[in-house]
Amino acid sequence: MDSPDLSEAPERGRLKMADIARMAGVSISTVSRALAGNPLIPKTLRDQIVEIAQTHGYVVNQSARSLRLRKTDTIGVVIPLADETGQLIADPFLLEMVGRLADEITLRNYSVLLNKVVVTEVGWLERIIQSHRADGLVVIGRSAQHEALNSVAGTYRPMVVWAAPQPDQHYCAVGGDNAEGGRLAVAHLAATGRRRIVFLGATDTPEAVQRFAGYQKGLAEAGLSLDPALVVAAPHAAEAAHAAMAAFLARDIAFDAVFARSDLIALAAVRALAEAGRSVPGDVAVVGFDDSVLARHGVLPLTSVRKDLEVGARTMIDLLFRRMAGEDAPGACAPVQLVVRESSR
Amino acid sequence: MDSPDLSEAPERGRLKMADIARMAGVSISTVSRALAGNPLIPKTLRDQIVEIAQTHGYVVNQSARSLRLRKTDTIGVVIPLADETGQLIADPFLLEMVGRLADEITLRNYSVLLNKVVVTEVGWLERIIQSHRADGLVVIGRSAQHEALNSVAGTYRPMVVWAAPQPDQHYCAVGGDNAEGGRLAVAHLAATGRRRIVFLGATDTPEAVQRFAGYQKGLAEAGLSLDPALVVAAPHAAEAAHAAMAAFLARDIAFDAVFARSDLIALAAVRALAEAGRSVPGDVAVVGFDDSVLARHGVLPLTSVRKDLEVGARTMIDLLFRRMAGEDAPGACAPVQLVVRESSR
DNA sequence: CTGAAAGCGCTAACAC
DNA sequence: GTGTTAGCGCTTTCAG
């Protein structure tokens, strides 16, 4: 295997530019130019060279090209996960987002490098960046990564994150329009005659704060006043939320609707309401947030606020390419819509 | 910006091995060896170099490494699509498969290059292979690509395809166990007391042939004889299948169950049965194949044969790595299971 | 044990 | 217009 193969196609399947050059009787540079469609090379010769390359199945080696050009024509899609287990599968949101991003990236003739990374040791993001395998990064964020993202944002520009805006955020973030979602939910409830609308859930994250702001705006637009007694701070866990709702019910305050911070909390509320003998949506209409699997397949089909991931993905990739071009594109919001189901019909 | 930066970290973010070498006061080769954990370098020096690299956020440039090593540590996941539109999203099977493959590949410390390719001009597969961006390929096949796959299979070994086995197949294929699926379906119907089981669907593809073989085996195992009058060749389109079933009903042949080649055909049969006044599953039990969205969310929750994609993906990646190691691993079957729902309860 | 040097396959500035 | 040449950043003989 050390003796050089002198045939035209040494080691079939590992053609290089030099081989094509020899076949065409020109220099390597000419082939390089021809294959790049460089008009310096006369069209006839260009076509001829392209033809030879094609019939022999030659394609430019991307590693070599990337090394030389310092450019990979690849976008990294980074999925930070908390542990090793197959979360990519379990989470339909993640899967849908990956699919939509892949569609958008492919559309621009870039490749997609899927980067499922277990976020244990520090520097995971730096490592991805410094490996220089991608020209830009889309990170499908979780709030836990806020610090890591912020720390690279200063020096690494071509990065866009799917995340809710946070106060001290230096990276470019795109996320669902939480405030608008809250507003939509309340507007819907008000439009169907509800007047005493509970907000259920803690406002301990940027997202929740915005959802609550939307709730307030919705009330104002509907001509309803905010009754502090109707703001119930339920923790974000099924059992605890259920208990919070039960406790609220015990206080016997009049209300005819619940806007919950999340589907999880909404369904906990539905359960508590049923136990208290209130019918949904008869006595109380319920709206959740996220349009998760729970909303569709939970105990009761739940009206919920859905983020438009198609637009979200497109926005992220748009911004990313602008940042890759040197522009300092800011973050943005992805539109939301209300999916009306049984729980508020 | 043309004046050379003489500081230790020129153009922050584009460190190279030479920079680390200078900082450590050793040669590039030593750094390379140290970073590769080569025991030739004394442990103390090795740790020292790794430390320097780490604190400066240096990571080996993958393009350069790949070029030199002729190895990318990347697996290409190829999704051939018939047209441009966002099919990746529309098809939950595709999405789940991508997720499972990504999990398996990441587990082996390889990267995933997602290759959504619109199959229009010939040579699409050769182009992917020759770009040398991946050490191996998983193709999520559609039967239409049989020729393209076969034509590269002879010279390109590290490739595994998700597809049903075909007669003249030279590539390594992994697919659901169609025969076993057919057998399971019939066994279930027989076990719930059905005796006159119709096979509905044409046997014009390798998959269908196997499903029919499973049907025969299932009958034999249940001590039932194959009645040719119960084998109904319905085309694979909703309307045509519906018509075929209606025609069969008009012939007034006694039967108490239908095993359909696919969920689509099964639901067409359910519709025809309803129109003929037969109840499902009261008068007739129906079983489909694929456990597609239709089965779960169609007019009636449908009992169906489900392929185990988790095992399928793992099998594909196992085989792929064996092929990458030079072994000539053969194709395999992924297990199937029966998901029992309303239509045959 | 360590370093110098060659070369992976390509592009582009610089000659001609 | 085309070819020669110098790297892109790395790994690995080969020499010491």
Image (cartoon, coloured by chain):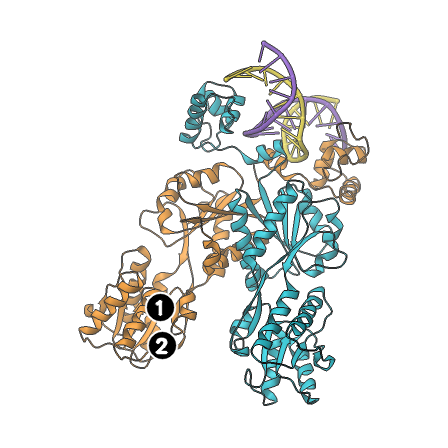
Chain colours: A cyan, B orange, C purple, D yellow
In the displayed structure, would residue B298 be above or below residue A232? above
What is the chain letter for disc 2? B
- Identify the residue at horizontal 61%, vertical 80% (top origin): A257
Q: Looking at the image, which is closer to me, B303 or A178?
A: A178
Residue A211 visible in image = yes
- Identify the residue at horizontal 55%, vertical 83% (top origin): A280
Q: Which residue is labeled 1 in the image?
A: B288
Crowding at dot 1, Cα within 10 Å, few <14 / some 14-19 / many 20+, comes out as many
Q: Quadrant of residue A305 in the image?
A: bottom right
Q: Quadrant of the N terminus of chain B?
A: top right
Residue B251 in picture, x, y percent from top left = 17, 73
Task: Identify the mark at residue A216; answer none if there is no mark.
Answer: none
Residue B188 in picture, x, y percent from top left = 35, 74
- Relative horizontal placement of residue B23, taking residue B179 as reference (left or right): right
Q: Quadrant of residue D8 in the image?
A: top right
Amino acid type, residue under disc 2 in the picture: Ser
Q: What secondary structure is found at the residue carrying circle 1?
A: strand
- Relative horizontal placement of residue B110, taking residue A56 as reference (left or right): right
Task: Identify the mark at residue B344; answer none if there is no mark.
Answer: 2
- Identify the residue at horizontal 75%, vertical 36% (top origin): B11
Q: What secondary structure is found at the residue carrying circle 2?
A: helix
N-term-proximal mark, 1 vs 2: 1
Residue B162 in picture, x, y percent from top left = 43, 53
Crowding at dot 2, Cα within 10 Å, few <14 / some 14-19 / many 20+, comes out as many
In the displayed structure, would residue B52 be above or below residue A149? above
Amino acid type, residue under disc 1 in the picture: Gly
In the displayed structure, would residue D11 be above or below residue A80? above
Labelled pair 1, 2 in contact (Cβ < 8 Å): no
Alpha-carbon span between mark 1 and mark 2: 10 Å
Q: Looking at the image, which is closer to me, A259 or A85?
A: A259
